[in-house]
Amino acid sequence: MKKSPVPLLQNGLRADGRAPDQMREVNIAVGVVSNADGSAVVSYGLTTAVAAVYGPREAHPRHLALPDRGIMRVRYHMAPFSTKDERKSPTPSRREIEISKVLREALEPAVVLEQYPRSRIDVFIEILQADGSTRVASLTAASLALADAGIYMRDLVIGVSVGLVENTVVLDLNGLEDQYGEGDLPVGYMPNLRRFTLLQLDGAWTREKFLEAVGLAVKGAEYVYQKARDALKNKYMSIAEEIYGR
């Protein structure tokens, strides 16, 4: 394991000054892409993901359509300018293709696809800035964009990351912790239903640390969930004011 250029944990605080159980600043807005049926932008600290949803619409090619449910396609992509390193290629990498599949599988339990037979829903996610936890910020953004599009959903899916840094469980990994920590646990959680839709484990964890991490993930997801609900409510309150406030 590579050594971090700065201490990841010192005097009980992380390199960015947070406590182990503290999220970075979370900012959420919906309805940010005017030509999409639904959209959202989510920031966890410096990590920023924007998602746009198109559909439901008729599935093409037609032989892929399902008679009893809709299909959902998800594309995750990191903008060439999203990282501090050398500019990444605009073509999809193997990692982006893998994350696209992971995100689709994490979103599907929340979407009532049975309401959309022979239809498809397209979800496009763009990482504008990457500083750790990009897949979980993307998951939250995509879930909110689906809700903004009026897609039937059982619950929002909130993404949070938990990691292991110097044998301490920490919430919401930043880029340094993501790169130099001993473990990583991206989580997708539906707070109202209390169900997990994503649980990936990387690194060596004891049973006790894993259980602690899951509990911390739930705490973080419930915090983000409230912010997500507020963002949706604020959008529709502003629409109501425009219609009835005249």
Image (cartoon, helix red, strand yellow):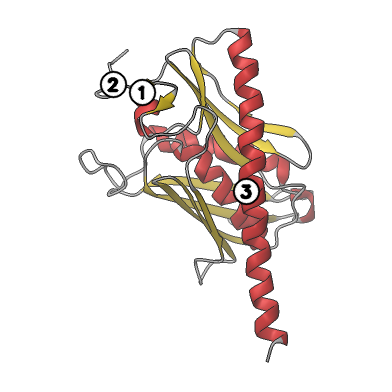
Looking at the image, which residue is at 64% across and 66% down?
A: 234
Q: Is disc 1 in contact with disc 2, using a CB cutoff of under 8 Å?
A: yes
The outermost residue toward the bottom is 246
Q: Percent from the top left, x then y, of residue 205?
A: 54, 10
| Disc 1, SS | loop
Q: Which mark is residue 168?
A: none
Image quadrant of residue 107? top right
Residue that badge 2 annotates: 4
SS state under label 3: strand
Residue lying farthest to the front in this orientation: 11
Please say if 2 is above or below 242. above
- Identify which amino acid the numbered label 3 is placed on: Met
In this rendering, does residue 58 appear at all? no
Task: Estimate how packed mark 1 is, as few (under 14), some (14 to 19) or many (20 or more) residues with alpha carbons within 10 Å.
Answer: some
- Residue 174 drawn at (x, y percent): 40, 34
Task: Give how far across and how far down residue 58 sits, in percent.
Answer: 65, 61
**Discs 3/1, front:** 1
Quarter of the picture holding the N terminus: top left
Instruction: State if disc 3 and disc 2 touch (CB < 8 Å).
Output: no
Q: Secondary structure at mark 2?
A: loop
Q: Is residue 140 above or below residue 201?
A: below
Look at mark 3 in the image and give the residue it sits on: 72
Label 1, on which residue? 8
At x 42%, y 26%, the residue is 13
191 or 68: nearer the viewer: 191
Looking at the image, which residue sits at the far top?
Answer: 206
**Between 67 and 138, the one nearer to me in the picture:** 138
Residue 9 versus residue 92: which sits nearer the camera? 9
Q: Position of residue 242 (x, y in %)?
A: 65, 84
> Residue 91: which quarter of the image?
top left
The amino acid type of the residue labelled 1 equals: Leu
Q: How many marks?
A: 3
